[in-house]
Amino acid sequence: MATAFPVPAAPAVPVVSLRALAPYAVFAGVILLALLYLVGMDQGATSMFSGTMIHEFVHDGRHLLGFPCH
């Protein structure tokens, strides 16, 4: 004898407008560009930090992303 189980309703997916999403996308873009600068361009002519600490900290990441450094 088969027992019928009730089928649960599908959960509603909230709709987020692009206007509400824009500030978060801009913030994420700025953070990603800053990280890209720190990993890829820090030892160049536009270096904001003196010394080699950041270069050595992200050295393997530079090679992984294809940035030449030596």
Image: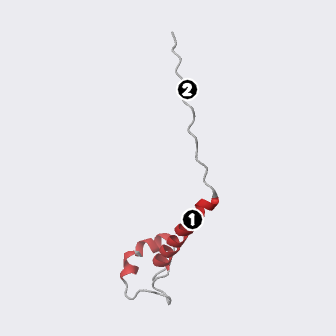
Q: In the picture shown, does residue 25 fall above or below 57?
A: above
| Structure colour scheme | secondary structure
Residue drawn at (46%, 78%) of the image: 38
Point out residue 45 in the picture as x, y percentages from the top left corner.
50, 90
Farthest residue, direction front: 20
Q: Amino acid at mark 1?
A: Ala
Q: What distance separates the C-alpha of mark 1 from that of mark 2?
A: 37 Å
Give the class, few, some or many, for how many residues have Cα within 10 Å of label 1's Cα (few <14, many ≥20).
Answer: few
Q: In the picture shown, does residue 55 fall above or below 19?
A: below
Point out residue 33 in the picture as x, y percentages from the top left corner.
53, 74
Point out residue 21 in the picture as x, y percentages from the top left corner.
59, 60
Q: Quadrant of residue 51?
A: bottom left
Residue drawn at (50%, 74%) of the image: 36
Q: In the picture shown, does residue 54 fall above or below 1?
A: below
What is the quadrant of the C terminus in the image?
bottom left
Q: Which residue, given by chain and number where applicable, does mark 1 sit on? A: 25
Q: Nearer the viewer, residue 42 or 12?
A: 12
| Position of residue 16 in the picture relative to residue 48 (left or right) | right
Q: Which residue, given by chain and number where applicable, does mark 2 sit on? A: 7
Point out residue 54 in the picture as x, y percentages from the top left corner.
39, 80
Q: Quadrant of residue 13?
A: top right
Secondary structure at numbered mark 1: helix
Q: Amino acid at mark 2?
A: Val
Q: Nearer the viewer, residue 32 or 12?
A: 12
Residue drawn at (46%, 81%) of the image: 69
Q: In the picture shown, does residue 30 fall above or below 53?
A: above
